[in-house]
Image (cartoon, rainbow, N blue to C red):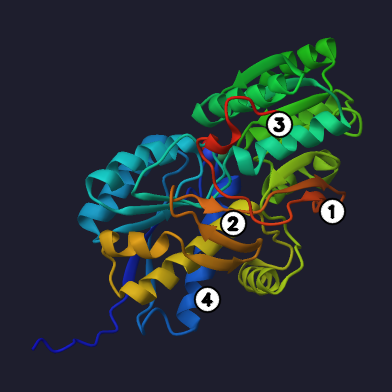
Amino acid sequence: MVKEIKTEEPWRVGVLFSNSGFLAVIEETQLRGTLTAIDEINDNGGVNGRPLEPVIYDPGSETAAFGRYAKQMMVEDGVSTIFGCYTSSSRKSVLPVVERLNGLLWYPTLYEGFEYSPNIVYTGAGPNQNSLELCRYLMHHFGNRFYFVGSDYVYPKVSNKIMWEFVRTNGGEVIGERYLNLRAKPKDFISVMEDIKHTQPDVIFSTVVGEATSLFYQAYMDYGFDPKVMPIASLTTTEAEIRNMGFDVGEGHITAAPYFDGLENAASSVFAARFKKRYGADEPTNMCLEAAYFQVHMFAQALEQTNSMETDLLRPTILGSEFEAPQGNISINKGCSHADLWTRIGRADRAGRFEILYESNSKVSADPYLIGYGRSIAF
Ligand code: ACM
């Protein structure tokens, strides 16, 4: 009989978020959310008596570095589970690595949907959990004429295609669509603002990400546009970007997210207290940070059962599992490895907090391919 070997060896996990470069404004918060959860788990005795040990790399907001570091972690550092990635392009750079080496990537960011990998757990919102309700809200409260502004990469382009379909199917129109370099400069927004002034949309839908978000909202303010009349609505402008641009610049603009800082429930209070104790009372939480936090807990929950880092053992344990997250009770959808999440819409106030304008009655099942919505997505 093989004697069970008791060990206190750490469980090594990979952590892959940028804390430098133009995406650090949001990815550093995801890094912090991950480390907050790891600390919390270790303070409570680890998993089956063994602590989690993060192996951390900084990809510096460079897409190719994500794939490179993922490979390095798996081949050289003995890591099989990775928490990481903000942009869809960085996820797509890690995907072939985890598929080839049978690892597991936990991806805590909203994205455009229309993807499935058995080696990824998607814990951010897909279009049926954010865009759909946001579109409905905007058409009801502001009007039918949309103007799209996004960063120039896969998420904004595909996300806008889906939003375009929602708008068009419900009798609206998209009167402008512009993409800016991820490293856009203030002057790059001038022609966009001129076009907005000229076309006078009812609402601007932004899929701008990272540092450029501040430049975009600042340019909007400089042009004297009024968010009460024509707000910028977004899926990516969180408390972190609002803080970066200045509370006065962000005030009045709208974001759809599963979680906003300050949600009142027991799990949210524990999470916020832990995070603020570690990083400062003035540091706001946000949806991407929250997903980065709860996904580590969901992983630990599965690891406790498998007592093994084997992806083939972890995967069936994760699928269908539930967790009391700060946003509410959530689950990993068995059919598609995406999280069933809450839908909320908020408007930023003068203090950089989101006032909640809409909240779903329950978590919304993940449907990354919009199968449940048929060919026409009428409200
Ligand atoms: C994103 O690129 N999924 C925000």
| Mark before the other along the chain sequence, 1 or 3 | 3
Marks 2 and 4, how far apart at CA:
15 Å
Q: Are marks 1 and 3 in contact (CB under 8 Å)?
A: no
Pair 4/1: label in front: 4
Q: Residues within 10 Å of mark 4 (few under 14, many from 20)?
A: some
Residue in the image at 78% along x and 32% along y = 232
Which label number is shown at residue 215?
3
Q: Residue 343, image x and y in percent?
A: 69, 49
Indicate the quadrant of ligand 1 in the picture. Answer: top right
Residue bearing mark 1: 351
Q: Residues within 10 Å of mark 1 (few under 14, many from 20)?
A: some
Relative to 311, is 358 above or below? above
Q: Nearer the viewer, mark 4 or mark 3?
A: 4
Most extreme residue toward the left is: 1
Task: Check disc 4 and report the residue beneath it.
Answer: 40
Lateral position of residue 64 relative to residue 202, left or right: left
